Amino acid sequence: MLSGSLNDVRFAVVDTETTGLSGTNDYILQLGVVIARADGTIEEQYETFVRRYFWRPGRLGAYKVHGITRLDLLKGIQPTKMLNRLNKYLANTVFVAHNAKFDTDFLNSEAQRVNDTVNINGPLCTLKLSRALDPKRIQSHRLRDVTARYGVVVTRPHDALADALATALVLPHLLRSHNINTVEQLTSHFGV
């Protein structure tokens, strides 16, 4: 599994945009992945739309939130290719997401639909890390509010790559706030 220094750990920061909130009944429309280090170094970024053939009105979900159109989806890749590409990014990395349960539920449902798996190491949830710093829940822990607290600018909220990048940029702040300096300390925060 993980060994060595925290500086050697690579994080696959993932965000999905979806048709709704149910991991079992809704679908992924867009995937963003940012490969980052604990110090905030960004090594790689990837985004794709996921090809869908939804022709019924309303099937795209909250268009006013994510702005994804049917034309965007036609330019996307098949769910199996999306999962294959994602698994390549997840190899030898720690999966990170803001509200990791949401994203892992969707990814696992997508994988189940096509008889595949998602190889998640972790996950590490930045939402849980943020909430743990505020046990009385005085502050909001939505991604836009967490990024604002740490001075991270999000240019396109509810875009998978922009949200993954924002999460990757707040991750070093959260690791420092929790005094996470070793791999052992990091793994104690795994789970959804």
Image (spheres, rainbow, N blue to C red):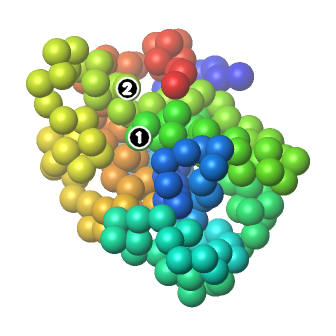
Give how far across and how far down residue 87 sits, in percent: 73, 49
Write the residue at 48% across / 65% down. Answer: 61
Task: Give the residue pinned by disc 2.
Answer: 128
Write the residue at 55% across / 45% down. Answer: 22
| Residue at the outermost bottom position | 71
Label 1 secondary element: loop
Give amino acid for label 1: His
Write the residue at 59% across / 21% down. Answer: 4
Looking at the image, residue 174 lies above or below residue 82: above
Looking at the image, residue 133 lies above or below residue 97: above
Give how far across and how far down residue 187 sits, in percent: 54, 17
Q: Is residue 188 visible?
A: yes
Q: Quadrant of the N terminus?
A: top right
The numbered mark at residue 98 is 1
Give amino acid for label 2: Lys
Give how far across and how far down residue 116 sits, in percent: 84, 47
Give how far across and how far down residue 180 sits, in percent: 38, 19
Spatial CA span between label 1 and label 2: 8 Å
Label 2 secondary element: helix
Write the residue at 63% across / 20% down. Answer: 3
Count of numbered tags? 2
Closest to the observer: 73 or 81? 73
